[in-house]
Amino acid sequence: MEGSKRLVPYSVYLSEEVHTALKEKARSRQASKVVRDAITMILEGGDQFSSGYKQGLRDAMDLIHRDELAATVSVHDRKIADHLIDQLEGMLNEQG
């Protein structure tokens, strides 16, 4: 499920119960992330552990990508952030 960081809107019909529960998540600004993560998990297949592990790696890569300090520090003309993200992507690709 690698690819662009650009998010594309998609509409889906939900039962009233699911819609209500999702609106509760929306109050804490988590609804979109919950839906994205669930769809990604389903499309990737595999078990819940593998899906959670992959999501944890993606979350770590996103955190590093957004961290100003990691993006400004370089060693041997290479940003620390880029090196760490490459390492985590390698772990993600190993999971297949």
Image (cartoon, helix red, strand yellow):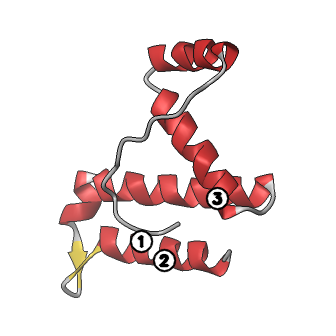
Amino acid type, label 1: Leu
Q: Which mark is residue 43?
A: 3
The answer to which of marks 3 and 1 sits earlier in the sequence is 3
Q: Which mark is residue 33?
A: none
Q: Residues within 10 Å of mark 1 (few under 14, many from 20)?
A: some
Amino acid type, label 3: Leu
Amino acid type, label 2: Gln
In this picture, residue 60 sits left or right of residue 83: right
Q: Which residue is mark 2?
A: 87
Q: Which residue is mark 1?
A: 84
Q: Residue at x 40, y 68 (%)?
A: 3
Question: What's the distance in space between the residues labelled 3 and 1, CA to CA?
Answer: 26 Å
Q: Is residue 59 above or below residue 35?
A: below
Q: Residue at x 56, y 28 (%)?
A: 13
In this picture, residue 83 sits left or right of residue 27: left
| x then y, percent, for residue 53 | 67, 58
| x then y, percent, for residue 55 | 59, 54
